Amino acid sequence: MLEAFFDNPAIMIMLTGALVGIAATLVGTFLVLRGNSMLSDAISHSIVFGIVIVWLLTHAQSGPVQIVGAALTGLLTVFLTELLVSTNRVKHDAAIGLVFPVLFSIGVLLLNLYARDVHIDQHTVLLGEIGFVWLDTMMIGGYRVPQSLIWMGAMALANLLFVAFLYKELKLATFDPALAKALGFAPGFLFYALLMFTSATAVAAFDAVGAILFIAFVIVPPSAAYLLTDRLWMMLGLGSAIAVASSVGGYYAAVAWNVSISGMMAVMTGVFLALAFLFGPRYGVIAQHIRRQSQTRANESRTLAVHLYNHEDEPNQGEENVAHALMEHLRWDRTKARRIVLRGLDQGLITRDGELLQLTAKGRAVALEILEPWRHETVTEAPADHA
């Protein structure tokens, strides 16, 4: 049964993509929240330099030595970026734009000069070959297991342990670095540790999915999850679920349309981001539109209640508290005034006596919430104080 599982190319491809997505989302969530998500772009490109250097020194194309060596290049990228920023001559984004093209271009030149015939080339680095991950295997327990699956499984587990054991420290360092420093959590060290895991994930992933899909998995699923929830643990879970769904959906869409699997997986992450942007329960465009419309209707009802309250029991009540006066004093057209009056009747805020509009007790309370808010606050706070 396990042999049939590992010999199934479709399952191996989707599982590898899902593991890359989970590993990238676990570290990418904190980068997105810190506003440093584009560091993943810089790291994923500059590690080419580290990959080539490690290959020149050890002739290792994969494995832990390659991962650690190239991951150190990611840290070198961040160090050089911070060094440029500390001069106060360039901004952070400009420093990233200066550092990673230099390291990336040196890596590409070294590839052309010394590793032309090795399975490390620009196409592999950028796009990967996830469609062939099931061909590059190693024997484990008598089963031929894809190497990408092994390395990405190990990387996803390492990232999960890193986030699980340092969850509280990472959360505090992300949202309040000053407090984290005061409590002795060393936010700077945590940041570099986070980037170390990000770099290692990029190195482990680049042979399978390439830099482009890795960047998409680091940024897009956490961003989509951020549109769905404000809770960090749920953001991590939703982001991972979106990454898995993107891998599965991207594979079947790529097969159906005969296009790049990695590219379609990246597109699917964008589809989920668009869905979250449109239908998110709190920050989605539709939810916000409905909330604004509801607020507008509530304000119209409050305006009607305040107007009627101001003229209540006055000698000119019969002239002011009628529909025609609403059009004249509140500058509402006939249709709008009719709609708001009908809504007030439906909500039990007003009653009609011929042409005269009168507030009910409920409508009077709504007016007093606006005109005398201190009374409302006293009433609402009293039960809490009592409790």
Image (spheres, grey):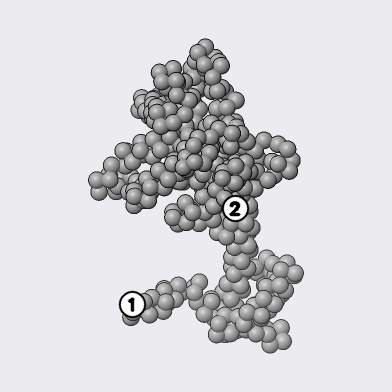
**Which residue is located at x 48 percent, y 34 percent?**
204
Q: Say if residue 31 shows up in the picture.
A: no
Most foreground residue, 93 or 100: 100
Residue at (41% x, 32% y) in the render:
64
Residue closest to the eye, 53 or 219 = 53
- Tell me how many marks there are: 2
Q: Residue 385 carries which label?
A: 1
- Residue 227 in picture, x, y percent from top left: 54, 53
Q: Do the residues labelled 2 and 1 touch (CB within 8 Å)?
A: no
**Position of 345 compared to 79: left or right?**
right
The answer to which of marks 2 and 1 sits earlier in the sequence is 2
Residue 307 location, quadrant: bottom right
Q: In this view, does 344 lie above or below 37?
A: below
Q: In this view, does 78 lie to the left or right of 42?
A: left
How far separated are the C-alphas under marks 2 and 1?
A: 40 Å
Look at label 1 and name its amino acid: Asp
Of tags 2 and 1, the one toward the viewer is: 2
Q: Residue 257 carries which label?
A: none
Residue appearing at x 65%, y 48% in the figure: 249
Question: Crowding near pointer 1: few (<14 within 10 Å), some, many (20+)?
Answer: few
Q: What residue is shown at x 59% (from left), y 46% (from top)?
A: 4
Q: Mark 2 points at which residue?
A: 276
Q: Position of residue 70 (x, y in %)?
A: 42, 27
